[in-house]
Amino acid sequence: MADETSQDRRNTKGRQRNRGQAGRQRKYSAAAPAQRKRSSDPARLTAFQILQAVTHEDAYANLILPTRIRRNKLDRQDAAFATELTYGTLRSIGTYDAILAQCVDRPLKKLDKPVLDALRIGAHQLLNMRVPPHAALDTTVALVRDQIGAGPSGLVNAVLRKVSDRSLDEWLDHLAPGESDTDLSIRYAHPTWILRAIKQSLATNGRPPEDFHAVLAANNIAPELNLIALPGIGDLQPVLDYGAQPSDLAPDAAVFVGGDAGRIPGVAEGTVRVQDIGSQLTARALANARDIEADESWLDMSAGPGGKAALLASLAQTKGASLLANDVSEHRTKLVAQALRVVDEDVWTMSVADGLELAKDPANVQRFDRILLDAPCTGLGALRRRPESRWRRTPQDLATLTQLQAQLLDAAMTMLKPGGLLAYVTCSPHIAETTLQVSDLLKRNADAKLLDSATALQGAALQHEGASALDRATITGADTESNTAQLWPDLHKTDAMFFALLTH
Ligand SMILES: C[S@@+](CC[C@H](N)C(=O)[O-])C[C@H]1O[C@@H](n2cnc3c(N)ncnc32)[C@H](O)[C@@H]1O
């Protein structure tokens, strides 16, 4: 079973290193497709099933893959292979479709959807995993015969042979040799509207244009598992003993490569949680920005599924503060309750409400000392972790979300005590969801003030001899007129989290 993942073989620009096969004779099975094996192997079958569910039923790969791996009884090695095949294929669909379009004698949309998904899986194995070409071909054809029928197996065999004529680098140099948005969109498998949004955000945040490739490449690298031992509740040592490395950025945090998160000590109990280190820092920054007075009242306005709420509540517990965790979605508040189960019950309460309605209740006006608005957003900062999201999100989503974000910001201001702290957070670097939201708020609301967000974020990071492990020079937005804070996957190995600390 092949096990080298695509990111292992990418160079510093994120381009795949040459597989050294260009021009070499490839070995294929001598048997005609009809004579080859018919059964699908379980890892490839799993990847195919997930791809089908994601591309045609709007399922989320990260939610259904673990269940499917268990149901198909994959061992550890097959589970790793299925995960790489599923995530890698989903992430690079745009690139593979551009290549497949050159190898199929009709528009791709005229292919049956399962056939197209099988071709994508075959292309990923041929171009981005170290699967020998004959194995990639034979197993994909077997999958097609088993799952779709004998009819399309000849076409799949012929198309994948054409795909295997070139390495990925050769295909990209052929199809997307330049620096145009279209070429980069194919090379890095980003829809052009997302690519342009990232470019604009880099410019707004003062990053040099040459960093563009690094950000796009970082979005294509599967992230390491980030963990946190909830302060005062979880124990990091058993996590480190299990093989995780301590984070060099955040307190109580560790980074783990490979393996099943569920087996890490404390994860099943909920005292250790899987959470992006950028997310950890934003929640901590709100709690650490100034000393916590006993009896402070905190609000997590859109808390589902509860990652930041669990961290906030555990920090509140250590200082005698309390947290109201709210979300508009009943289902997501159940996840919040699950996340908060390890925190004393007298520290937190929950509500299911639209944040806009919450602010209309007179009892909530100027009620909270600290508010986290981790706003619903496009999630363009978490492309590494949600492989299908880049193809699913649309510019129309952005229009709807930015309107809601502005309304939620106003509502948060209404509920904030004078002198209180409001953290506006998004998992997106899109300027319409980040810096523009903040500057628009400051224009709308003369009482609103932006605080030194980068310093707050730095204060949340690990401190060595009084200095923060988070290098201020890498926090974009810091020391600019906007004075907001943007993290980046290429610089910080976190999601592209945005953080702005406000008061009035
Ligand atoms: C980015 S997620 C929050 C993630 C969460 N803070 C965490 O760390 O796990 C945004 C949340 O906003 C919620 N939401 C969307 N519209 C809302 C509204 N009008 N009022 C309150 N919550 C809302 C969504 O249900 C979703 O759970």
Image (spheres, grey):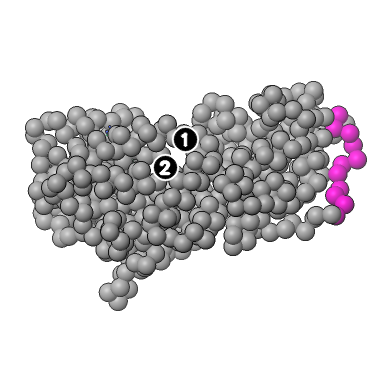
Is 142 left, or right, of 224 in this rendering?
Answer: right
Instruction: State the mark number for residue 236.
Output: none
Label 1 vs 2, first from the N-terminus: 2
**Mark 2 Cβ and ligand 1 under 8 Å apart:** yes
Is 187 left, or right, of 445 in this rendering?
Answer: right
- Where residue 453 sits: x, y (%)? 26, 58
Name the quadrant containing residue 202. Answer: bottom left
Neighbour tally class for label 1: few under 14, some 14-19, many 20 plus, Cα within 10 Å: some
Asked if residue 32 is among those painted magenta in the image, a careful observer would answer yes
- Quickly name the residue at label 2: 379
Residue lying at the far right in this picture: please name it: 30
- Quickly name the residue at label 1: 393
Q: Is residue 64 above or below residue 264?
A: above
- Label 1, secondary structure: give it: loop
- Where residue 140 sits: x, y (%)? 74, 36
- The one of 252 and 263 positioned closer to us in this rendering: 252
> Residue 468: in sight, yes or no?
yes
Q: Is residue 209 above or below residue 132?
A: below
Identify the residue at horizontal 71%, vertical 35% (top origin): 101
- Label 2, secondary structure: give it: loop
**What residue span does the magenta drawing correspond to?**
24-34
Residue lying at the far bottom in this picture: please name it: 465
| Residues tagged 1 and 2 counted as in contact (Cβ below 8 A) | yes
- The one of 110 and 245 positioned closer to us in this rendering: 110
Asked if residue 233 is among those painted magenta in the image, a careful observer would answer no
- Where residue 279 sits: x, y (%)? 35, 51
Neighbour tally class for label 2: few under 14, some 14-19, many 20 plus, Cα within 10 Å: many
Name the kind of residue labelled 1 in the image.
Answer: Arg
